[in-house]
Amino acid sequence: MSDKKVIETFSDYMNDETRVSPAERERIYFEVALIGKMIEAREAKGLSQRDLADVSGLKQPAIARLESMKATPQIDTLFKVLYPLGYTLEIVPLSNAHAGT
Amino acid sequence: MSDKKVIETFSDYMNDETRVSPAERERIYFEVALIGKMIEAREAKGLSQRDLADVSGLKQPAIARLESMKATPQIDTLFKVLYPLGYTLEIVPLSNAHAGT
DNA sequence: TGTTACGATAACATATTAGTTATCATCTGT
DNA sequence: ACAGATGATAACTAATATGTTATCGTAACA
C-alpha cells in the first residue's frame, strides 16, 4: 500500500525527535530505570504490592499502576514508595549517557 | 494560656515525625535542592520564567508555581523543565545525609 | 512620568493522578 | 479440587496539577 516503515527498533523510536522529545526520552529512560529498581527492591525485601502499599501509604492499585508505567506519578508519590525501599532521588547534570554510539 | 511550644526551628519541625514523615522529609529536602538548582540554572542562562516556559513547553504560571513550591509536580513536568536547564534525575540508595548531628 | 520586563497570583477549565472498592486470572501448595 | 495469595484492572470519586487568560506590583530605565 505504501512504503511507510512498519517495523523499527525501540531505539529508533526513542531517538525519533518527531515523536519523542529529548526531555521526554530522558524521562522515559529515567522511569524505566526507576521502575526496575523499585520492583527489584520490593521483591528483594519479600514484599507484595499490598505490603508496599501499606508501608508507603498508597493503595495496591496505585502500586500496580506505577510498576506497569500506566501513569506519570507525582514527586511525592514517588518518594512515598522509594523511601521504604531505601532509595531517594538526586539532581545531576546531563551527561548524554543515552546518546547512543 | 498554655505551655504549648510556639517557636521552633525549621530543623525541629522537619524532624518531628508526627508532622513530617521520613519520606515526606526526604522529598522536601529533594525539592528544595531541586528548586534551588532550577532557579540558579535558569538565571545563569539569562532566561526569564517566560523564556523557560517557552523552551520547556510549560506556561509561565506553571514555572512560577514550581519555583515557589506551590505544587508537587509530576515527573514529566519536572523533566520538561530540567532538561533544557541541563539537568536530569538519578535514583540513588538512601544515605541518611539529612540525619543531622 | 511613562514604558517595559518581570515574577506572582487570581479564576476558571481541563486533564490526570490517586483513592476506593471490587473482581478476575494465575499460581502455589494442600 | 480447593483455598489462599498475588498482580492486573475496571469503574467511579476526589484531589490536584496544569492550561489559559488576565492582572497586579515592582524594578529598571529612558
Image: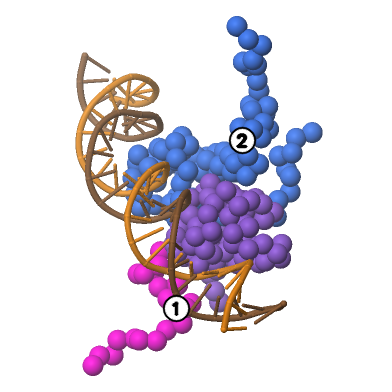
Chain colours: A blue, B purple, C orange, D brown
* Residue plotted at (58% across, 55% down): B53
The answer to which of B11 and D22 lies nearer the viewer is D22
Q: Is residue A41 above or below residue C23?
A: below
Q: In this view, does A74 lie above or below B10?
A: above
The residue under label 1 is which amino acid type?
A: Asp
Residue A19 appears in the picture as rendered: yes
Point out residue A94 in the picture as x, y percentages from the top left corner: 70, 51
**Which type of secondary structure does the marked residue at label 1 adopt?**
helix
Label 1 crowding class (10 Å Cα cut-off): few <14, some 14-19, many 20+? few
**Which type of secondary structure does the marked residue at label 2 adopt?**
loop
Q: Numbered disc 1: what chain?
A: B
Q: Does the magenta stretch include residue B9?
A: yes
Which circle marks residue A96 in the picture?
none
Point out residue B69 in the picture as x, y percentages from the top left corner: 48, 65
The residue that disc 2 covers is A20
The residue under label 2 is which amino acid type?
A: Val
User: Is residue C4 rendered to the left or right of residue B71?
Assistant: right
Q: What stretch is highlighted in magenta?
A: B1-23
Which quadrant, please, contains the N terminus of chain A?
A: top right
Q: Numbered disc 2: what chain?
A: A
Point out residue A72 in the picture as x, y percentages from the top left corner: 47, 43
Q: Is residue B6 magenta?
A: yes
* Residue plotted at (54% across, 51% down): B58
Which circle marks residue B12 in the picture?
1
On whether disc 1 and disc 2 are found on a single subunit, the reply is no
